[in-house]
Amino acid sequence: MKAELQALCDSFIQNRDAVKQAFKWDSTYIYPVCANLFCAHGKTADAEELVRCKKIIESQTGIFSNFRGNIRPALAAMLALSELPEEKMAQALENYSLLKQEFWGSEYLALVAFLLTGLCDRSQVEEKAARGKVIYKRMQKEHPFLTSTEDSVFAVLMAFSDKTDDELIDDMEACYTALKARFSIGNEVQTVSHILALTDGSPDEKAGRVIELYDALREAGVKYGRYYELSTLAALSVTGVGIPELVQDIQEASEFLKTQKGYIGLLGYDKKTRAMHAALLVSDLYTNREQANTAAMTSTLVQIIAQEMAMCAITASVAASSAAAASNH
């Protein structure tokens, strides 16, 4: 393994444990994403500082705030990476208020509000939000049953693109068409098409590279997922690094993680999730780090929320069965 990648892997485990210490009762799926935020910035997570940043969020928001949901650990990590966390939080809240003029409030919108603190100043937020809403509506028109709140993240990011709205929509639709021939039709493929639309190159070439990287990983014995995991792979595919080199790096990072606590046994992350975490680490070696982190955070949120919905459905089903059984006695 490359010395730099080994250092990233070691830092990743250290950072993950610090995040876990600060957020003991949060979803285990958010810990690696937060850990990688620190890896991407070349910094080490500190549990005490994360707790302090968590308190900053809590002191400036209500108990039911979207800033306090599943995304809270990632937001606290962003604050901890800032030189002025209190000011960053205040700006994010102001951004959120402006974004809500165009979008429904959600955890995804809270994420966008934080991302905008590093992308533009306050004077540009309304303009980007307005253009993002136009793009979002265009997304809904193309895919009314697939487009939902998580797509607001990419819609606003697309507002920074030099491409026209027509060019962005045409690009993402061409990518979607190329990708759906290889992967299942659904939210995951649409998210990948959004990531690719933010980059240069022809849609066929960009989609083809994602497919090539995915197939090369599978051929190399890496069990990479084709659902939520694809967004991280898409962000990595546009780095311009050769496919064989990316595959080898992901393989080696995955093999390292395989030996670490949290990845061992039935209670650890499965092979597909481990491979996604390895891809995140490899992205830190190359470019588009912010894009990879945004893709990972969005996918992680989708995954956590989907799990919560599944648990609610199971709970409701159990409750209904119990009620039916009781009524028969």
Image (tube, helix red, strand yellow):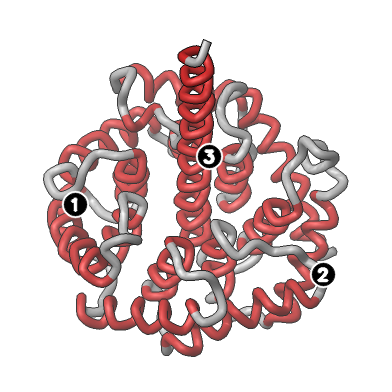
Q: Which residue is mark 3?
A: 307
Lower sequence index among marks 1 and 3: 1
Lower sequence index among marks 3 and 2: 2
Left or right, 255 with respect to 80, comes to: right
Q: Mark 2 is on which residue type?
A: Gly
Left or right, 280 with respect to 96, comes to: right
Q: Which residue is mark 1?
A: 125
Q: Nearer the viewer, mark 2 or mark 1?
A: 2
* Residue at image location 24% in from the left, 64% down from the top: 140
Q: CA distance from mark 1 to mark 3?
A: 32 Å
Q: Mark 3 is on which residue type?
A: Gln
Q: CA distance from mark 2 to mark 1?
A: 45 Å
Q: Position of residue 130 (x, y in %)?
A: 13, 57
* Vertical relation: 63 (above or below) 92: above
Q: Residues within 10 Å of mark 3 (few under 14, many from 20)?
A: few
The one of 39 and 84 positioned closer to us in this rendering: 39
Q: Mark 1 is on which residue type?
A: Val
* Vertical relation: 125 (above or below) 176: above
Q: CA distance from mark 3 to mark 2?
A: 27 Å
Q: Position of residue 131 (x, y in %)?
A: 16, 63
Residue 196 sits in which quadrant? bottom left
Q: Callout 1: helix, strand or loop?
A: helix
Badge number at residue 169: none
Q: Callout 2: helix, strand or loop?
A: loop
Q: Which residue is mark 2?
A: 221
The one of 239 and 208 positioned closer to us in this rendering: 208
Residue 175 sits in which quadrant? bottom left
Are the residues flagged by discs 1 and 3 in contact, CB closer than 8 Å? Answer: no
Q: Callout 3: helix, strand or loop?
A: helix
Q: Residues within 10 Å of mark 2 (few under 14, many from 20)?
A: few
Decide if residue 81 is in sight here. Answer: no
